[in-house]
Amino acid sequence: MNSGSTEIVSVSRSTGSLRKVATSSGRTYLVLKGPGTERFLEKGAVLDSGDIEELEGPVAQVAGLSYALRFLSRRERTEHEVRVALGAEGIDNPASMDYIVETLKAKKLLDDRRFASELIDYRLRRNPAGPALLRRKLSGAGVPDGITDELLAEAFPPGEEERIALRLAVERLARTGLVNGPGGPAGRAGREKAARRLGGFLARRGFSAGITGNICAGILREEITGETDEQ
């Protein structure tokens, strides 16, 4: 091998028929095993510039689509998550990356708005949270701010955040038993303890400081207990 050549130094299984091909240049390529790609799966094979172009272009596009389909079969993903996953598999050619992403969008298999809508809906039904926590989750997944702003505004019309926070507060108070009705045996110390714990809980769940503070004040005033009509 001359100094300008690139040699395949290892071939390892990625998933299914996908293979990771490592070269002497330090690059890794994703290849879908099948007719036409055998020469890229032989350890010790020497690659020329045309081979590299093919690995970065058509071969990467076919292999990347195969990988992305598997990746998306588990659950909804964002465009950002797909791009990060493909990059980790060795697909870093911008044109090939864009081709894969745009193909997935055209097939309606990749949709940031759908991802965000389903995440918000799931959390509000199964594990309620405030808009701040949901915003952090969506931002971490790479959902654009514009989509997040629009969907959170729809999910939290005026009064909705407070309603959800109050319901969670009442349910939690009922479970702890620290506050069980106006003038109950918990006393002032019990109400203060319950307010502190509940304040931290609601803050971690992403509810605003104003709403959290109002609920905690209601607990101290004996207006919010574990025995209200909000249970």
Image (cartoon, rainbow, N blue to C red):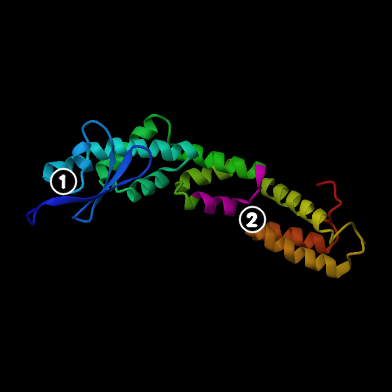
Residue 132 lies in the magenta-colored region: yes
Q: Secondary structure at mark 2?
A: loop
In x, y percent, where is residue 217? 78, 62
Q: Is residue 220 left or right of residue 158?
A: right
In x, y percent, where is residue 159? 69, 46
Question: What segment is highlighted magenta in the picture?
Answer: 126-138
Q: Is residue 202 left or right of residue 134?
A: right
Amino acid at circle 2: Arg
Which residue occupies the foreground of this view, 148 or 87?
Answer: 87
Residue at 7%, 54% in the rendered image: 2
In x, y percent, where is residue 121? 60, 40
In the figure, residue 125 lies in which quadrant?
Answer: top right
View extreme (front): residue? 43
Label at residue 45: 1
Q: Secondary structure at mark 1?
A: loop
Q: Is residue 215 above or below residue 193?
A: above
Q: Earlier in the sequence, mark 1 or mark 2?
A: 1
Residue at 34%, 33% in the rendered image: 103
Amino acid at circle 1: Ala
Label 2 sits on residue: 205
Residue 221 lies in the magenta-colored region: no
